[in-house]
Image (cartoon, rainbow, N blue to C red):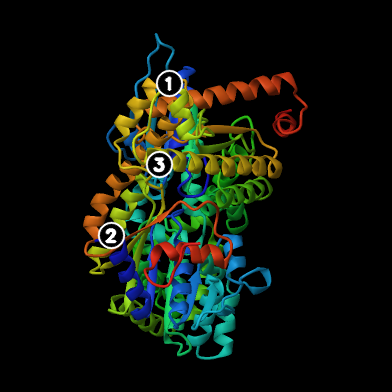
Amino acid sequence: MAGKGGVGKTTVSAALASAAARRGRSSLIVEVEGKSGLASMFGSEPFSYERVTLAEGDVAAGRGPVWARTLTPDEALLDYLHGHGMSRISRRLVQSGALDMVATAVPGIRDILVLGKVRALEEEQSADLVVLDAPAAGHAITFLQSARGLLDAVRVGPINAQARDVIELLTDPARCQVILVTLPEETPVNELVETAYSLEDRVGVSLGPVVVNGLYPELSGLAATPAAAATSAGTSLRRGEAASLSAAAGFRQDRMALQREQLTRLADALPLPQLRLPYLFDAELGPPQLDQLATDLLRGIEAMDASVLGAPTQAGHAVRADEAS
Amino acid sequence: MTDAAAASELDALVTTSEIVICTGSGGVGKTTTAAVLALEAARQGRRAVVVTIDPARRLADALGLGLEGIGNSPRRIEGTWPGELWAVMLDSKTTFDDLVSRYSSDAEQAGRILANRFYKNISGALSGTQEYMAMEKLYELHADPAFDIVVVDTPPTRHALDFLDAPRRLTQFLDHRLYRVLMAPTRGMMRAVNVAAQAFMRTVSKVVGADVFDDAIAFFSAFEGMEAGFKERAEKVLRLMDDPLTAFVLVAAPNRDTVAEAHFFAEKLGEAGIPVRALIVNRMHPRFTDQLPEALRERSLTLAGSDLGGLYRNLADFALVAAREEQHLEGLAEQVAPAPVVRVPFLSSDVHDLDGLAEIASHLFAVGHAAR
């Protein structure tokens, strides 16, 4: 899951995991920046390198569990050294600040350690679905590109092998897809389009549908004049209320028009299916809101599946069909 | 504090400060805010320069930093203001290269460093390099008598205030005892290298390959003698952060996650003994009514199905959002007090020209601005 800061990447990661859970799949959300609000969305305690359960599975109800964990380069390095018969030196390597030094000498090594760990999680089948909440925007490209860069810098040895494995994972559309998240606003859409092309060209990663987050839900009656609407509803307005009602309605209509414009612009610039998620006026994100977003995602995915099955060669969806074949 | 009082404090900030640093998490509008503050300083008759890190393309165009203008040295933006407005787009690598050239004893030393593969890696990717170079640029511009005020936009960091820590980290890096160990063989002190260090070097070579080491050793040989200059410079840059004429402005958006991050930023600044001089909150939803969201929602339910029901529902939605946003900001405002809190509403479109910047300025500053 990748996107510019502030577009709701973490929320969408959580919603996707919840959606998978509803389809009976287990999912593991992997967080790499150590500051996400994931835990509170599920109403659970903050988590660490150890896996925690954000939502229990329920076999009878066909619901899979949602787990989460944080990955840090230091911990991933320790894991890696343990797995490669270098346990003895590993602790000291991290404590002495040596990782910093190695990371400096070989840029991208932190990223490859984390991605290598993600790959290991996938290989171990630690969950049916691993959702990686990637670093924000520009970082996402460097992050995912780290493996290619390392192949040049480190031409032999285990890091080289690790980088190859990671590239194999990233470029296999059956195992890995990048989902880009954006808001229906100009700058985030521009950045998403740029990121999408960079990722395809430079990383060779397969792109899943894009998620457009924060769309104001449709509401009827916004075009009506408050006074007239009151008359036809057989009631009257308080003093000053007509002005508030029409200002608020105008604001929403304007913003919705801008949002539609951005959706069209995005569709024109990027031939990928869009999954759309509503702006939630209700409250801060908690389990019920997450549930709603998961429902919306599943609905979008079903519609997408239907159109892909119905017209497999249609432009837009053909991008995926080509790569999968 | 009233909005007007807050706005006039912000006025004072751009008329008196020599350095303004805009800090906050990604996606909150830091770059735009920095541009607006610099523009306002120019309107107040000052010679202002804004350093942007990664401007969205249309803002770059608005600032005269279009394709041909993007550069590491200041470019003047023409306008009708009494002062001057200049803009720089930070290029970390070039800034680092300049620094190397400045502290090299001769062109030959500089050339050896600049061509080294290890140097190329660190100048592009050493964590904190971009942050440090932003500060370096700031120092350089501040020292330039051509400018009265430097406004800088900080890079989007993974961790709060990486950039405050960056000079120290860079000098620590240049000073790292492991590098001393690395350097030892070339200094003919092989025997002094202890067993543990040798074991360490063998392990690292095994993991990343030996040529990485060769590059590193060549770099540090070339760098010999330059550490002192770098360190001294870093200390001066850090001292500038404590200067009373340097103002930190915290930029935020009114949602839970970014407010949480803003708290964290404010706390870190506090620990560093640096006061937040102003809190600017972008993307506030407008407040259309004083009525309670619950009451409005109820009314919409009793009128469900009618146009009026929809209108009430919509008003209830925005009343709810406005109340929640204010609630988020409450604690933050207390934390940064007595710093003024200035709110900027959601704009109807992205900022891509000087008019757009001026519209934001009309929300930020008290005097001489009619909202467009």
- Which secondary structure, mark 3? helix
Query: Are the residues flagged by discs 1 and 2 in contact, CB closer than 8 Å?
Result: no
Label placed on residue A244: 3
Q: In percent of the image, x 69 and y 32: which residue is there? A: A320
Q: Nearer the viewer, residue A93 or A166?
A: A166
Image spot of residue A268 (x, y percent): 71, 42
In the depicted structure, whether residue B103 falls above or below residue B34: below
Say which residue label 2 marks: B266
Question: Tag 1: residue type?
Answer: Ala
Q: Is residue A199 left or right of residue B142?
A: right
- For disc 1, the neighbor class at 10 Å (few under 14, some 14 to 19, many from 20) is some
Label placed on residue B304: 1
Q: Nearer the viewer, residue B130 or B317?
A: B317
Q: Is residue A222 left or right of residue B227?
A: right
- Which secondary structure, mark 1? loop
Residue A308: quadrant of the picture: top right
Mark in the foreground, 1 or 3: 3
Q: Work out whether residue A321 can be spotted.
A: yes
Question: Tag 2: residue type?
Answer: Ala
In the depicted structure, whether residue A125 falls above or below residue B65: above
Q: In percent of the image, x 58 and y 61: which residue is there? A: B352
Quarter that holds the N terminus of chain B: bottom left
Image spot of residue B31 (x, y percent): 48, 63
State which tag comes first along the sequence, 1 or 2: 2
Q: Marks 1 and 3: same chain?
A: no
Query: Are the residues flagged by discs 1 and 3 in contact, CB closer than 8 Å?
Result: no
Question: Tag 3: residue type?
Answer: Ser
Label 2 to label 3: alpha-carbon separation:
36 Å
Q: Marks 2 and 3: same chain?
A: no
Label 1 to label 3: alpha-carbon separation:
19 Å
